[in-house]
Image: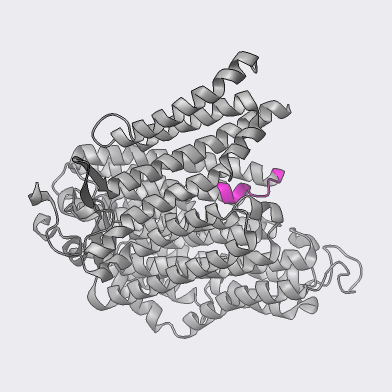
């Protein structure tokens, strides 16, 4: 499994998958995609990196424990809901702001922030599981 | 589009109904990010739970002044949005849960293995509190299912922390049966949604009466099975004594004090408030379940020699008392039920905490080898004495008042001459009190009075008892002491408790205010 070809291709593959995961996350509001599937793609990218370079390298690349990413995601999603308290509307109400960027309308909304939170939760959880499993295999 | 959206401003105080859950979730998430900083985790967790406790107090005060408070998420109008509704029952239960968790965090500092701290005991506790508060405060049955899952996941994690074999064994039994229970719950929800087209509690109250009674009763029976398993009612109670003694004492106090009570709460909410007609049909089943649980619990405790397993059986006996109130179905009986839940949350958690101290003193989990604690450590003995009388329901301690209400409810039901059920229930409640008293006296005699081990030839003091270290003394005895003090004071001045029981039962039986607060007054028949 851990061949020279795999080790050479893996970083490229991982980079493409991570970018693609962000693309899937952002298109998810109106089209197929979203935080859950995006997070899964990102976690698979990390799993491939772990297979090719070893679990330690993957953990180093993450900087912090994968579960901390999951925690960040939950916090982000909760904060996206709590923001409504400033606008006299109930928890989790969708709030939108649209600004122009070179004649392109960019819509920023709390559902998007929530979805980014979901992305991190899924990424962090699946990455923690995947790295733990790969660790077992390497150790055994 | 705008017709389905809320067009009035949400008052900031309505946020009180969601705040305990959001804070717990947010706090758990932040603690997960800080997993390397273990000392900071503790203080942060303590601070967050303290804020949750305060917001629960504010919520309970608000509810007792102005009636139920509600908020429907995302500006959707009920029943389309997910509603959170706090009536008196939910608010006070949530308050008790937060209070118990606060004390447990302090107690936990005394004997938590470092490994458990590394694996995230604090985030899991906050997640558990989020699940428990969410279950109490939600006004939507599917959302209740979600909080059940949150509770299940976090309790699963808490139970296995530390990873001793006995814990894995207990967790598998616990996890499997609870997964089964939530699956039944989910199946019942599917049927309910298919029949009524709604899962909003306030909406169900209005529509259940118009649906086919046979279908509604089948659903109610399925819910009874699911919540009965969660609450560890007879005959689906076997998982509780098999698992609750496995984790460290503070964790089993948390689980025993909160989780089964959520099952009882869900049972009361579903059968008494949502489907009252089906509850009447199911009354014989409820009576049998209640009697079985009432009798089996203390009998198991009498037979058991492991201290915390014996306490597990006492938890089950208490569940029987709460189901007896649901089986009676009259206001007094229900008041007995809700006050019993509150009493059990406090007293049972306290008993587990003291049990942890006794295990620390004797280095044993078996009551046969504990002996002589009274001479070695008088303060834990005193705490245990108060709590054991409270759990047995000896006046004037806390457990007496709910049982008094249940007995009174039994006489009322019997006096109406409807059937013999009330009389048998009445007898079972009395028998439960007597058997519980025998069980705890036995524990008292074995652990405290007997000088040494079982069958020891000499009258000399037990040499295996170790004095508590100063840290354990302050943290462990302190937190258990505060809990016991609350139990003692609530027992000596029962007016707030009895007032709460009366109002909460009235709210469950006549949920008109609940429906209005949710914003569905037009839907009620």
Q: Where is residue A83 in the image (x, y as percent from the top left)?
A: 30, 59
Q: Along the line of sight, which residue is nearer the eye, B377 or B73? A: B73
Q: Where is residue A53 in the image (x, y as percent from the top left)?
A: 63, 27
Q: Where is residue B519 in the image (x, y as percent from the top left)?
A: 16, 60
Q: Along the line of sight, which residue is nearer the eye, A102 or B478? A: A102
User: Can residue B455 be seen at all in this image of the molecule?
Assistant: yes
Q: Along the line of sight, which residue is nearer the eye, A132 or B441? A: A132
Q: Residue at coordinates 80% horizontally, 78% vertically from top-left?
A: B375
Q: Does the magenta stretch include residue B163?
A: yes
Q: Give the range drawn in magenta.
A: B157-165
User: Can residue B417 be seen at all in this image of the molecule?
Assistant: no
Specify whether B9 is left or right of B328: left
Specify whether B134 is left or right of B479: left
Specify whether B103 is left or right of B110: left
Figure disc tally: 0
Q: Describe the colour scheme in one phrase.
A: one colour
Q: Along the line of sight, which residue is nearer the eye, B135 or B275? A: B135
Q: Quadrant of residue A66?
A: top right
């Amino acid at each position: 499994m851990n061949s020279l070809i795999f080790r050479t291709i893996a970083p490229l593959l991982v980079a493409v998958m991570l970018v693609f995961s962000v693309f899937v996350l952002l298109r998810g509001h109106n089209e197929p995609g979203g935080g859950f599937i995006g997070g899964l793609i990102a976690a698979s990218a990390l799993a491939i990196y772990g297979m090719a370079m070893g679990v330690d390298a993957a953990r180093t690349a993450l900087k912090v424990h994968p579960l901390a990413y999951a925690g960040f995601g939950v916090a982000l999603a909760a904060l996206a809901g709590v923001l409504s308290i400033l606008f006299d509307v109930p928890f989790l109400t969708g709030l939108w702001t649209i600004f122009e960027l070179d004649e392109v309308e960019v819509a920023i909304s709390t559902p998007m922030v929530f979805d980014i939170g979901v992305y991190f939760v899924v990424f962090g959880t699946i990455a923690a599981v995947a790295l733990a499993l790969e660790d077992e295999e390497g150790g055994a | 589009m705008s017709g389905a959206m809320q067009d009035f401003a949400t008052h900031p105080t309505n946020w009180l109904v969601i705040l305990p859950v959001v804070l717990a979730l947010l706090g758990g998430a932040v603690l997960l990010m800080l997993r390397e900083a273990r000392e900071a985790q503790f203080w942060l967790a303590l601070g967050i739970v303290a804020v949750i406790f305060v917001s629960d107090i504010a919520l309970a005060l608000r509810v007792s002044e102005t009636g139920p408070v509600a908020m429907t998420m995302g500006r959707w109008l009920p029943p389309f949005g997910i509603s959170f509704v706090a009536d008196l029952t939910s608010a006070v239960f949530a308050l008790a849960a937060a209070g118990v968790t606060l004390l447990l965090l302090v107690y936990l500092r005394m004997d938590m293995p470092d490994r458990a701290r590394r694996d995230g005991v604090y985030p899991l506790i906050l997640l558990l509190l989020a699940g428990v508060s969410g279950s109490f405060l939600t006004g939507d049955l599917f959302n209740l299912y979600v909080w059940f899952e949150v509770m299940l996941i976090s309790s699963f994690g808490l139970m296995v922390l530390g990873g001793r074999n006995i814990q894995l064994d207990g967790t598998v039994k616990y996890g499997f049966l609870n997964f089964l229970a939530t699956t039944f719950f989910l199946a019942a929800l599917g049927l309910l949604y298919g029949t009524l087209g709604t899962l909003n509690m306030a909406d169900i109250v209005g529509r259940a009466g118009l649906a086919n009674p046979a279908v509604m009763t089948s659903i109610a029976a399925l819910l009874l099975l699911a919540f009965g398993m969660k609450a560890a009612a007879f005959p689906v109670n076997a998982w509780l004594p098999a698992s609750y003694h496995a984790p460290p004492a503070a964790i089993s106090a948390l689980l025993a004090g909160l989780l089964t009570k959520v099952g009882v709460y869900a049972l009361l909410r579903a059968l008494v408030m949502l489907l009252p007609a089906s509850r009447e049909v199911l009354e014989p089943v409820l009576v049998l379940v209640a009697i079985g649980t009432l009798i089996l619990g203390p009998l198991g405790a009498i037979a058991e020699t492991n201290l915390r397993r014996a306490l597990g059986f006492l938890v089950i006996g208490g569940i029987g008392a709460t189901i007896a109130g649901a089986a009676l179905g009259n206001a007094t009986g229900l008041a007995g039920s809700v006050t019993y839940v509150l009493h059990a949350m406090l007293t049972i958690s306290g008993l587990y905490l003291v049990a942890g101290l006794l295990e620390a003193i004797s280095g044993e989990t078996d009551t046969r080898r504990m002996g002589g604690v009274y001479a070695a450590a008088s303060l834990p003995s005193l705490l245990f004495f108060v709590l054991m009388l409270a759990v047995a329901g000896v006046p004037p301690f806390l457990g007496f008042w709910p049982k008094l209400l249940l007995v009174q409810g039994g006489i009322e039901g019997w006096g109406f001459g409807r059937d013999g059920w009330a009389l048998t229930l009445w007898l079972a409640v009395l028998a439960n009190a007597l058997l519980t008293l025998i069980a705890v006296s036995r524990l008292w005699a074995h652990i405290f009075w007997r000088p040494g081990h079982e069958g020891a030839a000499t009258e000399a003091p037990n040499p295996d008892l170790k004095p508590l270290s100063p840290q354990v003394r302050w943290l462990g005895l302190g937190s258990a002491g505060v809990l016991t003090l609350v139990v003692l004071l609530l027992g000596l001045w029962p007016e707030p408790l009895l007032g709460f029981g009366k109002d909460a039962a009235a709210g469950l039986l006549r949920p008109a205010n609940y429906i209005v607060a949710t914003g569905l007054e037009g839907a009620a028949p």
